[in-house]
Amino acid sequence: MTTNSSVYTTLADLSGAYTIDPAHTRIGFVARHAMVTKVRGNFNDFEGSGVVDGTDLAASKVTLTIQATSIDTRNEQRDAHLRSNDFLAMDEFPQITFVSTGFSKTGPASLDLTGDLTIKGVTNSVTVPFEFEGAATDPFGNLRVGFEGGVTINRKDYGVTWNAALETGGVLVSDKIVLEFEISAIKTV
């Protein structure tokens, strides 16, 4: 039996524990390259879970662990450089983590998720605005929810400082990085 997503119209309807479905989730990033174009990439190996408390959203929790080695920009040479000590130093810091510290509802289908983001051993608080994209019961009887969000961070705030000057002025890699989240999560309890 398939449940129409309109049954789940508020965050309160979604109380429960969830696990991120990596096969239907994208965790990506965008960086400006050579000051003229954008490079997009993904992390392909991650796991996450959360508990939504629909009656007290502030009591909700989310954790996410990303394997830095799974970075993928569709260019093996660039990916190897991103894994190196110049960028993510994945041998010393193999994981990127996010642990929520707060939620706040910002609209009927939107919320801000605040938490501690740790990259390369440096932790900073970030707030990611999310939109609730809907919920439905899939053909296997699983309740699925979808959220989309994104936030801009400064990579230098995480000790990721490598760059190269361009002859025409400017730098090879932007300091600002946009993190993108397209989340599909399955209710477990």
Image (cartoon, grey):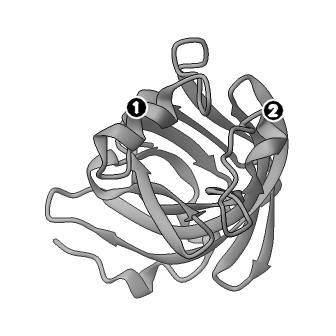
Amino acid type of the residue that numbered disc 1 sits on in the rendered structure: Ala
Secondary structure found at label 1? helix
Secondary structure found at label 2? strand
The residue sitting at 33% across, 46% down in the picture is 22
The residue sitting at 29% across, 40% down in the picture is 76
Up-down relation of residue 135 to residue 70 (above or below): below
Q: Quadrant of the N terminus?
A: bottom left
Label 2: few (<14), some or many (≥20) within 10 Å?
A: some
Q: Disc 1 vs disc 2: Cβ atoms closer than 8 Å? A: no
Query: In the image as oriented, which residue stretches furthest toward the front?
Result: 167
| First in residue order: circle 1 vs circle 2 | 1
Give residue 10's position: percent from left, percent from top: 60, 78
Residue 183 seen from this side: no
Q: Label 1 belongs to which residue?
A: 80
Give residue 140's position: percent from left, percent from top: 15, 56
Up-down relation of residue 123 to residue 101 (above or below): above
Give residue 183's position: percent from left, percent from top: 45, 60
The part of the image, by quadrant, that contains residue 189 is top left
Query: In the image as oriented, which residue stretches furthest toward the top?
Result: 92
The part of the image, by quadrant, that contains residue 152 is bottom right
The residue sitting at 73% across, 67% down in the picture is 169
Q: Nearer the viewer, residue 122 or 147?
A: 122
The residue sitting at 60% across, 12% down in the picture is 92
Would residue 65 be found to the left or right of residue 183 on screen? Answer: right
The part of the image, by quadrant, that contains residue 108 is bottom right
Would residue 45 be found to the left or right of residue 148 on screen? Answer: left
Mark number, residue 123: 2
Give the total number of marks visible in the rendering.
2
Amino acid type of the residue that numbered disc 2 sits on in the rendered structure: Thr
